[in-house]
Every structure is written in C-alpha cells, then in structure tokens.
Image (tube, rainbow, N blue to C red):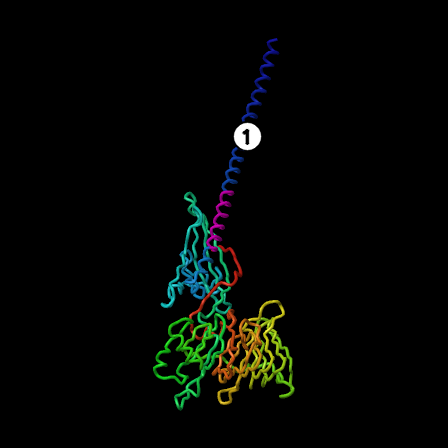
C-alpha cells in the first residue's frame, strides 16, 4: 500500500514536472504571437497613415497646380508665360528644371534664372503667388517655370506637402505640368502700309494709304501707316504722333490722314507708326513651280485649281508667274496637313466672282497664317494686287512688300460678316481705293498662326494657355 502510494505520488509529481514547462512554453508562444499581432497591427497603422499622408501630399500638390493655372489666367500674369523662372534648389545647389524643363536630366546649372522680375515698365506688375495653404495642413509651392519658344510650350513645377507636427520629415510630392502657350500681339497689325519716302525728293510719291471709306473690320482691324509718307502739313504731321482708338477725340485727324472721306469704318486703332516687315519674299530651293493661273481669255493655264500642303506639320512652297482669274473660277488651297506659301512672281488680278480659298478637309476652320500669298517682284519692277467686283481672297495673309493693293471692288464676295473682298491680313507698300464702295478687309479674330512674323516688331504681346499637354509626378 505504502509502495503503491509512493509510486502514485512519484508519477503525479513526474507528470506535474512535465506539464509545467509545456504550459510555460505555450504561454510564451501566445505572448509572442500577441506581440507579433500587435506589431503587425501597429505597422499596418503606420503604413496606412503614411499612405494616407502621402495621398494627402499628392492632393496638395495637384491642388497647387490648379491654383497656379488660375493665377496664369490673370491678365497681369500672362506676361510670365513667355519668361523663365528657375531658382536654385537648396538641396542640390542647381536649378529645379533646367533648359529642357524636365527635372533630373543633368542640364540644370548653378545659376539662378529669374526673368519674372524684369517686366517692362509700361506693363502692369504681375501678382503671382509662389506658395499657399491647401486645407488645414497642406502647403504648396511654385518652384520653377521654363518656356520653350520653339515649341511655344511652358513647364512649371509645383511641390505639395501635408505638414504634420509629429512627422516633420514627411516627403513632399512634385508635379510638373507642360502647357501650350498662344502669344498674340496686343495691337495686331491687321493692315500695314509701308510706302517709303523717295530718297531723292524726300517726299512721298503719293499717299501710301487711301482707304476712301473702305471698311477694316474685326477686333484685330488695326492700321499702321507712316504719316511722313502722306502729303500732310507740318502741323498735321506733328499732331499724328501716336494712335487713335475709336471714339478718341483725335480720331478724326487720323481718319482724314488715311482716307479722302471723313467716314470712319475702321474697327481698330489707327497708328501713325511705320512698321517695316523683315520677311523673305524669295521662294526657297525646291519650291514647286505651278503653271500660270489664268483665264482662257488672257492666257493658257489652269482655271479652277487645287493645291495642297504636302509637308505634314510643315510648310509647302508653290510658285506661279501670275494669277489672273475671273468669272466663277477659283484657286483652292488645302491646308489640312500644314501651311502653304504661294509665291506670285507677277501681277495678281481677280475679277467678278473669282476666289482664292483657304480650305481644310478635317472639319477644323482654316487659319489665316496657313495660307500666305507673297508677291515676289522687287522694287524696280513691282507688281500690283488688283481685286475687282465680287472677288474674294478668303482666310489668307497677303504680302506685297514692294507693290500695292488696289481695291476696285464692290463686294460682297466673302463669307465673313460685313462687305469685304479680303478676309485676312494685308501688308503692302501702298493700299488704294478707286471706287466709292465701302467693301474692304475683314481681319480675323484668331491671328495666332501669324505670331512667328509679328514677333519681330517688338510690339507688346498677349499670352494665354491654350491646352494642358501633360501632367506628371516627379521625385527630386
């Protein structure tokens, strides 16, 4: 009995000694599992919080982009769109964007660029804000802006960050936005008369501009002429020292200087300012030669003719010795794929219902700068552009640097509103009128396609964003 009891107690203690380590071990495992679960949960909370903070920083940066775009639409800030601002990044000691407008491409320099502080005095100072607050804790900053004159695009870089007191090193997010810029001369020269003074007599051969009541229509219907090339008295010359807008007290003096009648049918400003376009009127090598565009009664040639742009996105050059069309005959120029320059090495005469049309086949409206009609005769043998009856040059830039434009027409052969014979832009040495009709020139509102040639005048420009081309996040 005693032996059995001892044996039982021994077994009981033996089992008990084996069970306690197991229990202790299992407890430690449970503690480790609990600690691991707590750690994972805490880590997930940290990751989730970080992701949330990162998402908030991205949202702040993109909100900063939106605010910057709004600021660029303000008239006083439009001047900045064609100027560069690229300071030094304190972390790298170099520009943020560099010449190519792309971060981290190794073209950044150690020289700060700031053209935003050098604004002409006659312009309103910009009101751009370089930083701001988004929501409760968000802060954004406009870091840099680069303009590419060749592509007429600009790129600006914005940083956004959610500022948290317990996480001061939270990373910022960067967004670079590439935009297309349209630039237009403020007082666009819709009509230029550039008759020079005779170098021998120092007097004009005759008045370089005599509209005689002809209409110059459109918001860009501004006229530039040289008052010295008109037979005016010295007192009248001295009084024409600037410009006159419609309704100005001195408007009548300007109207009388360019017209033999007092009727004012000019929508834009009249500038007593000589502008001399420095444009080449010589066809380049490889220009396609066309046969004469004439009526059967005046020569052998093509009556109704269509020419098209063959250089996609570029310029196609054509040349003809003369254009002389009448009746219902037409020359159609398809500028769907690009611009067409039509050089005329002789007279350009249009009568009756004849037309020269700028057309597109893609459903988009043609642009005035995509069809350029250039009379190439030199000063010694200049030729005229003569438009009579109901003829129309439709949506084109007409350039006769050494000859004149004679309006002997009665209109209305053009599709624009108003009585016109040219829907476009006219730059010529002389512009004259030989009838009592008011049919004239309708200058289009959209003249951005001529910005490449108007920039040379140095006139004030108006800039605006046309499209947002790309929107990309970056790491610096």
Of all residues shown, which one is farthest toward the top? 1
Residue 160 on image: x %, y %: 46, 52
Q: How many numbered discs sit on the rendered protein? A: 1
**Residue 116 placement, left or right of 176:** left
Q: Look at the image and say whether residue 56 sits in the magenta stretch.
A: yes
- Other-residue count near label 1 (Cα within 10 Å), few / some / many at <14 / 14–19 / ≥20: few
Q: Is residue 349 above or below residue 126?
A: below
The residue to which callout 1 is attached is 30
Q: Residue at x 57, y 26 (%)?
A: 22
Asked if one can make out residue 111 in the rendered structure from this viewpoint, the answer is no
Of all residues shown, which one is farthest toward the bottom? 200
The one nearer the camera, 415 or 96, is: 415
Residue 12 on image: x %, y %: 58, 17
Residue 246 on image: x %, y %: 42, 71
**Residue 263 placement, left or right of 15:** left
Helix, strand or loop status at disc 1: helix
Q: Residue at x 51, y 37 (%)?
A: 39
Range shown magenta: 47-66
Residue 111 on image: x %, y %: 40, 64
Q: Is residue 361 above or below residue 11?
A: below
The quadrant the N terminus occupies is top right
The one nearer the camera, 297 or 304, is: 297
């Amino acid at each position: 009995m005693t032996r059995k009891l001892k044996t039982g107690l021994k077994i009981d203690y033996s089992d008990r000694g084996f069970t306690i380590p197991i229990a202790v071990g299992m407890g430690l495992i449970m503690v480790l599992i609990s600690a691991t679960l707590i750690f994972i949960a805490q880590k997930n909370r940290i990751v989730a919080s970080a992701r949330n903070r990162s998402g908030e920083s991205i949202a702040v940066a993109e909100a900063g982009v939106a605010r910057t775009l709004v600021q660029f639409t303000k008239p006083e800030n439009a001047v900045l769109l064609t100027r560069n601002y690229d300071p030094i990044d304190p972390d790298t000691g170099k520009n943020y964007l560099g010449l190519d407008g792309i971060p981290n491409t190794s073209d950044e320099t150690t020289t700060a660029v700031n053209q935003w502080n050098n604004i002409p005095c006659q312009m309103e100072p910009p009101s751009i804000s370089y930083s701001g607050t988004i929501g409760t804790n968000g802060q954004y900053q406009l870091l840099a802006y680069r303009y590419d004159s060749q592509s007429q695009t600009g790129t600006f870089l914005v940083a956004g960050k959610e500022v948290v007191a317990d996480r001061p090193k939270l990373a910022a997010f960067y967004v670079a936005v590439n935009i297309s810029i349209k630039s237009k001369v403020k007082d666009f020269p819709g009509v230029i008369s550039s008759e020079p003074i005779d170098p021998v007599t120092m007097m004009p051969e005759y008045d370089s501009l005599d509209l005689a009541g002809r209409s110059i229509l459109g918001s860009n219907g501004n006229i530039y002429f040289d008052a010295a090339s008109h037979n005016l008295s010295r007192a009248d010359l001295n009084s024409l020292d600037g410009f006159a807008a419609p309704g100005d007290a001195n408007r009548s003096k300007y109207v009388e200087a360019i017209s033999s009648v007092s009727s004012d049918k000019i929508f834009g400003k009249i500038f007593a300012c000589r502008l001399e376009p420095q444009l080449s009127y010589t066809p380049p090598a490889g220009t396609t030669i066309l046969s004469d565009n004439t009526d059967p009664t005046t020569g052998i040639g093509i009556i109704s003719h269509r020419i098209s742009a063959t250089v996609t996105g570029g310029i196609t050059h054509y040349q003809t010795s003369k254009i002389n069309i009448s009746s219902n005959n037409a020359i159609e120029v398809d500028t769907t794929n690009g611009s067409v320059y039509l050089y005329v090495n002789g007279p350009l005469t249009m009568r009756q219902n004849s037309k020269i049309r700028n057309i597109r086949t893609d459903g988009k409206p043609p642009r005035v700068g995509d069809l350029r009609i250039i009379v190439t005769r030199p000063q010694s043998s200049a030729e005229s552009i003569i438009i009579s009856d109901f003829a129309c040059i439709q949506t084109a830039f007409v350039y006769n640097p050494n000859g004149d434009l004679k309006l002997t027409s009665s209109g209305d052969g053009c599709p624009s509103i108003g009585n016109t014979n040219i829907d476009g832009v006219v730059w010529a040495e002389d512009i004259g009128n030989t009838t009592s009709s008011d049919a004239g020139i309708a200058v289009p509102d959209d003249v951005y396609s001529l910005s490449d040639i108007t920039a040379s005048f140095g006139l004030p420009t108006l800039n605006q964003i046309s499209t947002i081309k790309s929107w990309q996040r970056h790491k610096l």
